[in-house]
Amino acid sequence: MAGTRIPMSSLKQILLLRSLGTGKNKIEELTGVSKHTINGYLDQIARKGYVLQDLIQMEEPALEALFHGTNEGDEVQRFNTLKELFPNFLEELRRVGVNRMLLWQEYKEKHPLGYSYSQFCYHFQQWNATNKSSLHIEQKPGDKVYVDFAGKKFPIVDRYTGEVIEVEMLVATLGFSGLTYIEFCVSQKKEDFLQCVENAMMYFGGVPLACVPDNLKSGVSKACRYEPRIARDMEDLANHYGIAIVPTRSRKPQDKAWVERMVNIIYSRVYAVLRNDVFHDIHSLNQARLPLLEKHNGLKMQDRDYSRRELFEREERALLRPLPKDRFEIKYYLNLKLGGNNHVYIKREQHYYSAPYRFIGKQCKVIFTARSVSIYVNGEQIAFHLRFTSATRYTTNPEHLAKEKRYILELSPEKLLERGRQISPVVEKYLQEILNKPMYVEQAYKSCEGVLSFSRRVGHDRLIASCQRGIQLNVFTYMFIKNIITHSLDKIEEQHPQQYTLPFHENIRGAQHYQ
């Protein structure tokens, strides 16, 4: 495919924007992916007759298998190899007679599987590009939301220890109307950050076209002026809400001027108002900030006769896209091998989840959230489970097991005892004693099955007689019943031992002698 290879989460954002009728130039602007790469993917989609909505609904492993059959790690290594040469290329180009074509030819001699000349030039240009000019960008309704953590923290006091704990505040501002959402949270970690961003969408009642976060680690895993690498969880959130992520450039505060300016306003309208109050937990602090937030959004803006809320309701709300039906859940990704018991083991949960036995030994991609676990092999979903933690540590779908194992799984003490009861209470009692023995449950079931099988082979009467012998002798095993029937001992009438009494003699001591 022409152009550079991108993560499937980024491709889904391109597809989402394209499905909304967004032009390629606008997609390039919002996602940071070059139009050359965008054209490559869209051309392949059109050539193969793929439907955009079908691709958007696909899970990322399936989408990756559809577009890329090669190992993504090889592509990353190839790019990193080229990137390490760029500083030297820059010096070489200052020398007489050296041009990009010459550098590319030398590069291809050392790396035959390297990039083509067009891709070589593209990557070098992206690395070397500079743009220090400042440009005012006219904000459009429903276009962008800017999010950032405030630089100053707010103190809360532990109710029991008196310890002062400083908490974070996230600010989210719509670029056009300036409608603002703020929320206090414990940290800047991804769980807190993503929940605050999602709560902002709920507050706005809709989804803008793009989200502009700062280069914090919760949202951007690797900062870059031209192609920042979005954190996986942030991309998952964006794809869930159908919103493009366009991080600000590192150390470029003008890219987030809207939210920076709003943070300063919030300091005076929230921090200053609450400065003399004492809060003991995040919940009470967030409750106190709500009326101040509404007051801020309802105030008339400077040099204007309307408020942020009025402008939002009048011109922006209708242009926001609807919220999805379900709330977002953080996804966790693992590469695991399906074990011989046809289960994968998630170590952090200390729990096993089953998959079809025919995939035993295969490498699986496991995606799990707070509510579900999905298992993939080569892009195909082979198992789905509701996430479940319990003392049993196993979640098993019987249909995933081989036939013989499935039969054992479907057995239960109640079913075995009921079958014994239908033959005789004696057989039922014998089975109950086997089940009471301290042995591996599957072995106990097999022993009971073996005992019951004699009812078909030799009839009920002989099985009942054999079980009666076992009860009298207090021996409860399958092998005992087998030996009784094999040697026809059940047909021999039980003979009681003859009672003998000793004759009286003066040299014989009686029982009283030992008292």
Image (cartoon, helix red, strand yellow):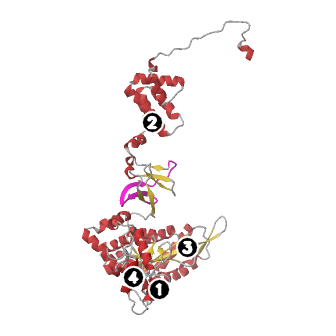
| Amino acid beneath label 1 | Gln
Residue 141, visible in the rendered structure:
no
Q: Which residues are magenta?
A: 366-392
| Amino acid beneath label 3 | Glu
Instruction: State yes or no: discs 2 and 4 in contact (Cβ < 8 Å).
Output: no
Task: Examine the rendered structure and indicate whether residue 355 appears above or below residue 77.
Answer: above
Disc number placed over residue 254 in the picture, else none: 1
Mark 3 lies on a secondary structure that is: strand
Mark 4 lies on a secondary structure that is: helix
Q: Nearer the viewer, residue 482 or 218?
A: 482
* Magenta region includes residue 339: no
Q: Which residue is mark 2?
A: 446
Give the total of numbered labels: 4
Q: Which residue is mark 3?
A: 168
Q: Nearer the viewer, residue 421 or 226?
A: 226
Q: Nearer the viewer, mark 4 or mark 3?
A: 4
Instruction: State yes or no: discs 2 and 1 in contact (Cβ < 8 Å).
Output: no
| Amino acid beneath label 4 | Glu
Give the side of residue 409 with respect to residue 16, left or right.
right
